[in-house]
Image: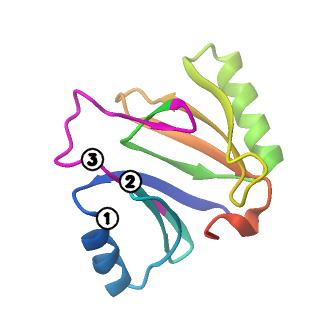
Amino acid sequence: METSFHMSLPCLSIKETKKFYTTIGATFGRATEYWIDANLYGHQMTFIKSGKFNFNSPNYVFEGKILPSFHFGIILDPETWKTIYAKLKAEKLELVSESQFLSGKVGEHNSFFVKDPNDYMLEFKTFKDANDMFKS
């Protein structure tokens, strides 16, 4: 698997966001009325409908877990993902612990979050099947 970039950003309108990103060459996969995954030249961008973004309430709920709306990250093969998880845990960094999402469904993946020194949240993902990254 080639390494792909992942970024999650708040948006005002899923419809308008999809229209704009389609214009610049994105295709779309998994989606709900509140978020959509875009394939922008092989990189995964998730847009989350949150209105005008307020950094004082930067979370959303996905599969019962509270996650940061504003984050970016990297999608890795499973072995590299495990290595980085273990390394960050050994450094005693505050990790939002490992979680599995979409279990048994298209797009099943493991994920964890960590804050960088600037308070940005980074997500590290590994998909059960890398071909599912943009499938709906």
Q: Residue at x 77, y 45 (%)?
A: 80
Q: Is residue 49 magenta?
A: yes
Give the quarter of the figure containing the C terminus.
bottom right
Please tell me whether residue 134 belongs to the stretch shown in magenta.
no
Callout 1 amino acid: Ile
**Pointer 2 with pointer 1, Cβ within 8 A:** yes
In the image, 122 versus 26, the foreground residue is 26
Residue 78 location in percent, x, y?
A: 80, 47
Residue at 20% from the left image edge and 49% from the top image edge: 51
In the displayed structure, 128 sits above or below 81; it is below
Residues 109 and 30: in front is 30
Magenta-drawn segment = 45-65
Q: CA distance from mark 2 to mark 3?
A: 8 Å
Name the mark on residue 50.
3
Quarter the N terminus occupies: bottom right
Ranked by sequence position, the earlier of labels 3 and 1 is: 1
Q: Which mark is residue 14?
A: 1
Q: Nearer the viewer, residue 87 or 54?
A: 54
Quadrant in which residue 94 is drawn: top right
Q: Quadrant of residue 129?
A: bottom right
Residue under pointer 2: 34
Which residue occupies 68% across, 29% down? 98
Q: Secondary structure at mark 1?
A: helix
